[in-house]
Image (cartoon, rainbow, N blue to C red):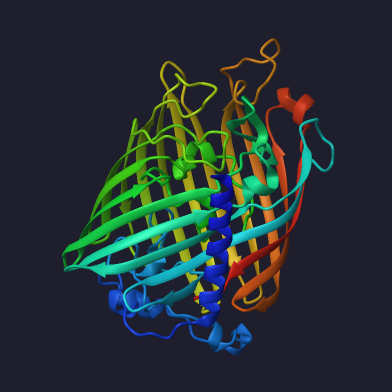
Amino acid sequence: MVYTLRLLLVTILFFGTQTAVAQSKHGGGHSKSSHSSDDDDDDEEADKPSKSDDDGPEPPEKDKMTLKDMVHYYSVQLPMNRNGSGTAWNPDKSPMYAYMFHTHHWTFMVHGDIFARFNMQDINKAGSRGGEKFDVPGMVMLSGQRATGYNGLFHFNIMLSPEAAVAGGGGYPLLYQTGETWQGKALIDRQHPHDLVSELSVSYAWAYADKGDVFIYAGLPGEPPLGPVTFMHRPSGSFNPDAPLSHHWVDATHIAFGVATLGVRYGRFKIEGSSFNGHEPDENRYNFDKPVLDSRSARLSFNPSTRWALQVSQGYLTGPEAIRPTENITRTTASASYVYPISPRKYFAATALWGQNAVTAQEPSNAALLEATLRQKKGVIYGRAEWVQKTGEELSLDPLAYSQRYRFNVQALTLGAAHDLYFFKGVFAALGAQATVSRSEPSLNGLYGKLPISVEVYLHFFPILQ
């Protein structure tokens, strides 16, 4: 099985690169301009940036594909740019870094982000919980869709991650991060690697009215409607190689081995419900976990204009953590994402979100995040600020010295930047670096120090901006 999945990864990478470079010129498909969202034509025109000399040279035309041949994953009436992760919505003005190609009946897209990184946590040795490692966080995704029947749309997603193959089962160092296990022990101050197959999903959507759709979505693994767009797919966070510390308060269910979702959209609103596997993936990152549908969630999404995406959601998760199998969680989230296009190759994006985990007979714990990205013609500047409440048990603190139920307040501030080095055959390579300053309560200074500083240097590979 491991050999087969690795072969699948190599095959898709090769197939996507070669077909994108070949740039098939067949006609057909839907025009993006003919599927503008919900009477926002005036907003579209007002937001449409003008090309200026300041933007620098465009990549060669032969390396470019337009989005006119592809529509939204779950609607023939919505623009492709609204796609996020799973069935979640981004703002319509979101950038799309991808290769596009198509056959007579099918339209395909390959996109992804790969960071080749050296990661140094607590570089100033403020405490004893730091670490350093070379790793490669990221993902590669292949999507395909075709029209079926009258106003019907069939779609599939395949997403693969190199993280486990490079970083190993213990993942990468990340101060104050918690969630999942390795070799039977909780991962503390480390971000777990994502499964090699991070999404394998299919969906069918049917337009029942001029502004309405109904859709079904199934994944093994897949993403239920709980939380905003996952961090690596948000325009405000996709240039940051780290998972947020709030990941397991907001969007950790993005890899669930067993998901069945039903959704209905009318106009700018969408409501969806799901039954899914609430357990975090097991330690074998190359297999397919046994699918069970033991948890549930619901989400209400609202895009008031082409620049905004809002959502509120709640889910009941059955035994998500393997080390606490009887601990069930009610997770509640709310978020707002914003994208402002400055010019064809420049934009500003921001996201504010909140998440809460509630366990029976315990005080709920909360997390909040604010992140933003400013993309320039040849580089990017980004930042992320977080506040998370984590218990002594989650941080694996000595029970003789620390209360296991007490919620410690953790804050982290990250600033980063990257500069595009070259563009070759539809792929950008950027050199970047970021620094994070963390802090928690004084009682943890003996373990973490007062202000531990973490630094990362990386090469970021990503496809052309459509």
Where in the figure is residue 164, as x and y percent of width and height?
63, 45
Residue 449 visible in the shown view: yes
Q: Nearer the viewer, residue 401 or 108?
A: 108
Q: Can you name the residue that lies furthest to the top here?
A: 400
Where in the figure is residue 82, as x and y percent of width and height?
38, 64
- Which corner quadrant of the image does residue 461 belong to? bottom right
Q: Residue at x 69, y 45 (%)?
A: 167
Residue 77 visible in the shown view: no
Where in the figure is residue 34, as x and y percent of width and height?
28, 79
128 with respect to 436 (left or right): right
Q: Residue at x 69, y 10 (%)?
A: 400
Q: Residue at x 67, y 50 (%)?
A: 414
Q: Residue at x 52, y 65 (%)?
A: 111
Q: Nearer the viewer, residue 378 or 217?
A: 217
Q: Can you name the residue that lies furthest to the right here?
A: 125
- Which corner quadrant of the image does residue 179 belong to? top right
Q: Is residue 33 above or below residue 77?
A: below
367 with respect to 380 (left or right): left
Q: Nearer the viewer, residue 177 or 361?
A: 177
